[in-house]
Image (cartoon, rainbow, N blue to C red):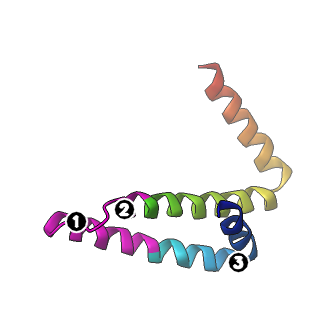
Amino acid sequence: MASKRNTELKSMSVEQLQHEVTELDSNISKLKFDHAVRGLQNPLEIRNTRKEIARLNTEIRSRELSTADADVLTKRSKIRLRRRSK
């Protein structure tokens, strides 16, 4: 099922992905409120929604990096190298 979802994400545009993130973000706040007030039938919905938001954000970021120019990528590599050395 995960690979099917990944192919769906690959076919979506960046605008669609960002729209989906905003929808899920509003949905997660509604779920949290409902859970605090009366409890949810399945509280794992909150976790699954957070994971779905993370998947979407990861796809958006990977597309940003794939279209980035060489200067940005080399600067990013230097920052990552500096973080590892600490």
In magenta segment, residue 28:
yes
Q: Residue at x 71, y 62 (%)?
A: 3
User: Which secondary structure, mark 1?
Assistant: helix
Q: Amino acid at mark 3?
A: Ser
Say the numbered circle drawn on residue 35. 1
Instruction: Label 3, secondary structure: give it.
Output: loop
> Which residue was labeled with disc 2?
46
Q: Secondary structure at mark 2?
A: helix
Quarter the C terminus occupies: top right
Q: Residue furthest left?
A: 37
- Residue 42: x percent and y percent? 32, 64
Q: Which residues are magenta?
A: 24-47
Which labelled disc corresponds to residue 13?
3
Image point (19%, 66%), residue name: 39
Cα separation between marks 2 and 3 = 25 Å
Contact between labelled residues 1 and 2, with CB atoms less than 8 Å apart: yes
User: Dots 3 and 1: beta carbons under 8 Å?
Assistant: no
Q: Is residue 28 left or right of residue 16?
A: left
Mark 2 belongs to which amino acid?
Answer: Ile
Report whether 74 appears left or right of 60: right
